[in-house]
Amino acid sequence: MNVRRLVTFGIAGLATIVAIGTAAGAAPGPAKFQPPADSLRALAAPTGLRIGSAIDPFDLNTPNYTQVAGDQFSTVTPENEMKWQVVEPTQGTYDWSGGDRLVAFAKAHGQLVRGHTLLWHNQLPNWLTTGVANGTIDNTQLLALLHKHVTDEVTHFKGKIWQWDVANEFFTDSNPSGINPNNFWITHLGTGVIADAFRWAHAADPNALLFYNDYNIAGEDGTNAKSDAVYAWVQQMLADGVPINGIGDQGHLDTQYGFPTAMQSDLQRYADLGLKVAITEADVRTFVNNATEQVPTDHLATFAQPYEFLKMMQACLAVRACISFTVWGYGDADSWIPGFFTGEGYATLYDVNLAPKAAYFDLQQDLQIAAHGAPERTGS
Ligand code: XIL
């Protein structure tokens, strides 16, 4: 009997005890959320892989959107609501409402939460960047403010976050790649600030899995230079005893570049260091007629888009340490792509009317097959 069966058996046994307790007069607890049997999350469950999406917690007022969010995914990431700009819009005044709302939704739907993100050069509060620019915040104060930010945020969500994206997007897109010396944080505080953030996060919530997250770090750059740089860096972090548990490859692909063939081997080599890996922000964009309808202009893109989604998930499935596959939003109408990549869209699993597309059905089918052969996740 394998471990998973034992665990399942254990839970079934518990259910019996609870049922007896209820019959004896105790108030029944909330019913456990049951996703549809053909949902992505249910089909992925036998391998232990969690399927996730970025969610805008305030979109959870929309019934169609909410239905898909609960039914299809077993992990959720706030698209923006845990970023510093959102949680501390005025210095010293926290707004946790979006994050709290998503955490509550996740709990009600049997989902785990990926926290995103503590240390990044984008979406910083204005008071912080303005203060640094005009000299009212010096580097010593900046370090103290960052320490407080990481500690307060991780403490607020302590025990509710499965994986934290502690640090995000520090490496250059050049060949060779390295930590970007022009990054806001590196300019002011030096490269050691990344390790500091991991140590502070670990001190505040020792049970959360702490991730370094970036794009093009699983061969998407063609040369593998960025992956090589992150690999060398994380090896050093581990040698230095920095509490880092995983590497997240964002997985923002574009059909015009083709599928990165090194993805599986790149994920595997991070895993071989003893790390977890995850696909954290998957989408596959292509050129479209306009941002409203998002019909691909090249009809071959309607094949390439689902193909690249599928290959990305297969790369994750083939690596036992790959514990989650998260898409960056699930409907084309809500995707960040049209706003950030001129002329592109069609990047998600559902169309602009929230009807599932070929990519959705391909993942569904492949997960069904994987349930009968893909390796079970390690320690998920
Ligand atoms: C994006 C969000 O999707 C947008 O809504 C926001 O305006 C900008 O940020 N890499 C990341 C994510 O790590 O946080 C980014 O999310 C997309 C790129």
Image (cartoon, rainbow, N blue to C red):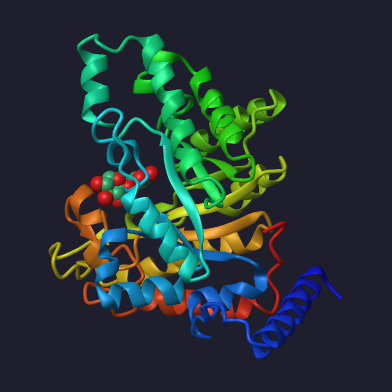
Residue 168 x %, y %: 43, 37
Residue 230, placed above or below residue 7: above
Q: Nearer the viewer, residue 79 or 319?
A: 79
Residue plotted at (68% across, 30% down)? 238
Q: Nearer the viewer, residue 109 or 266?
A: 109
Residue plotted at (76% across, 71% down)? 7
Most extreme residue toward the front is 25
Residue 156 x %, y %: 46, 42
Residue 172 x %, y %: 41, 29
Asked if residue 262 lies left or right of residue 136, the reply is: right
Rendered-image quadrant of the C terminus = bottom right
Most extreme residue toward the bottom is 23
The quadrant holding residue 282 is: bottom left
Residue plotted at (39% across, 54% down)? 100
The answer to whether residue 258 is visible is no
The answer to whether residue 6 is visible is yes
Residue plotted at (32% across, 40% down)? 87
Asked if residue 194 lies left or right of residue 242, the reply is: left
Residue 86, placed above or below residue 128: below
Rendered-image quadrant of the N terminus = bottom right
Residue 230 x %, y %: 55, 33
The quadrant holding residue 117 is: top left
Q: Nearer the viewer, residue 169 or 83?
A: 83
